[in-house]
Amino acid sequence: MSSPLATTNSREEKVTICSDWWNESHKHIINAEFSINNLPVYVEKSNLNLRKNFSSFIDVVNAKQIPFIISSAGIEEVIQISIADYKIPKLQILANKMVTDEKGKITDFREPIVHSYNKNGFLMKQMLQDSNVLLGDFVVVLVGDALSDLLMLEGIEPRLAYTIGFCNFEKNLQTFEANFDTVLERNASMDAVTETLIQILGSPTATEQLSLSPIRTMPPAAEKEIVTKILQAESILSLPYVKCRDRSVVEKKIEKIIADGIDQLVVISDFDYTLSRAIDDNGERCHTTYGVFDVFVDEIRPGLSQTLKDLKNLYYPIEFDPHMTIEEKCPHMEEWWRCSHSHIVSAGFTKTNIERFVERSNVLLRKGAEQWLRELANADVPLIVFSAGVGDIIETKLRQQCGKIPDNLHILANLMKYDENEVVYDFSEPLIHTFCKNSSVIDKAASFYPSVSSRPNVLLMGDSLGDVHMDVGVNHQGHTLRIGFLNFYSDDLLEKFLHGYDLVIINDQTINIPETITRMATAASLKPYDA
């Protein structure tokens, strides 16, 4: 059997190899007819020992009530016995759990199998009893002894992640240095982990700017070609909710975009259900920018909400009908938009009304989007939010959640016109609907256009077939990677999306995939330190 750690194996191959390996090992354990009642004796006779000063680490964890997750490809019952002397109220274990009969004989292992290449954040959210600790605003200190342990960050969106690698074998040192923030070479103690926790807890905000002191950092000779192995294109394409039609073409596009670096990239994104979520944490459908009016307009003009909903019920099925061509859909979309605009204008909304509606709505940015927008702004990556929605709603939501509209972000959408009393009296022209988001509505004289057209590569994001051609009219000579968010699955739509988009992300409410790609491109742009 080939080693699952062989650099020649793709992640997909490693997943298959590890699954087979673990399955075979579990079968041998089951066939040996072990009794779980004898397990404490086996553990006691083994040389399985906790690292030095583990108790001091647990003291800090307990004193500050820090959630402690052990994510292991090992056996849960062995882990529990090993730490049985410690009371850890906030402990959760993700590992392979034994199934026993009434006499304690091991008859099976719980599914799914947990191995080195699938013990990530997605599996934690699925299997942990309290996965809410992985939601919201939180900081992660990740500790591992293998590169594959970095996958534990995959599928979660911490505000800060600090990684510590125990390098137990000298041959792995260089690779560890390139991937972990701190590397502990042949170190049997938990002291550095405990000190890192204390530093983070001592920071009033534990922000991205937290100043930790790594024992080893990225070596000075970090070159553009060095990109974290765990986050290669093959890692993205191996995720179960990511689909593509031609894997080799997509891999080449991603690799080219990463190699060219972040300063050669522009991002063009739809807003509704692309930058914003389609489903909230309660499983409810989120509002779109026009949907905000559907919910709150009756406060200004009773009965208007139902009128707008009736229009949506009439035209929405047409927008997503897989059997109609875009040319057939366009006249219907224009009718829908113009009718909606006319009704909205007739209600006499004010800017204050709009701000209050947005504040009370469940228009939600995708998980991780706020952080991603900051990263794009810090890297000065032009971000064109190209939406057939209401630009005023988009701008208000971004200001309310992010504090301000960053200079790199430009909104192309249907904008309201206000009179001297800040009352809406019209919408801007040209009208932008789902299927005309292309060069026909782009003002080449716009101040942002030169910075966009000078960058060869495009990361394009949408949730509709009408979003596929948002880069048409943008003068670029490189590659466009099209990412489609399929928020409401059907076989017919998936087939259409796979023809239009390079990557199709199914029923996922995070910004993880685009963020991973831009982070890799940012890493590739880093210049070596002066010698």
Image: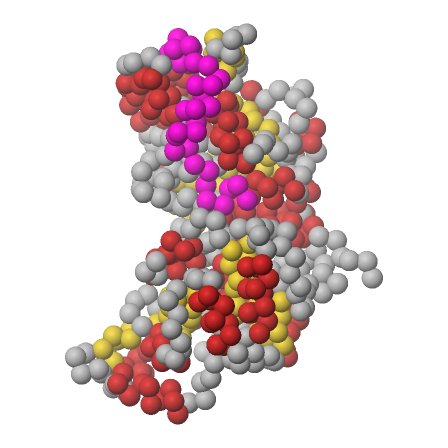
Position in image of residue 123 (x %, y %):
38, 60
Residue reaching furthest to the right: 531
Magenta stretch holds residue 325: no
Position in image of residue 110 (x %, y %):
29, 70
Quarter of the picture containing the C terminus is bottom right
Residue stretch rendered in magenta on the structure: 343-371
Position in image of residue 107 (x %, y %):
23, 78
- Residue 254 visible (yes or no): no
The vertical placement of 321 against 501, above or below, is: above
Residue reaching furthest to the left: 102
In front here: 222 or 498?
A: 222
> Residue at (45%, 78%) from the top-left corner?
1
Looking at the image, residue 221 sits to the left or right of residue 485; the answer is right
Magenta stretch holds residue 367: yes
The vertical placement of 354 against 155, above or below, is: above
In front here: 172 or 158?
A: 158
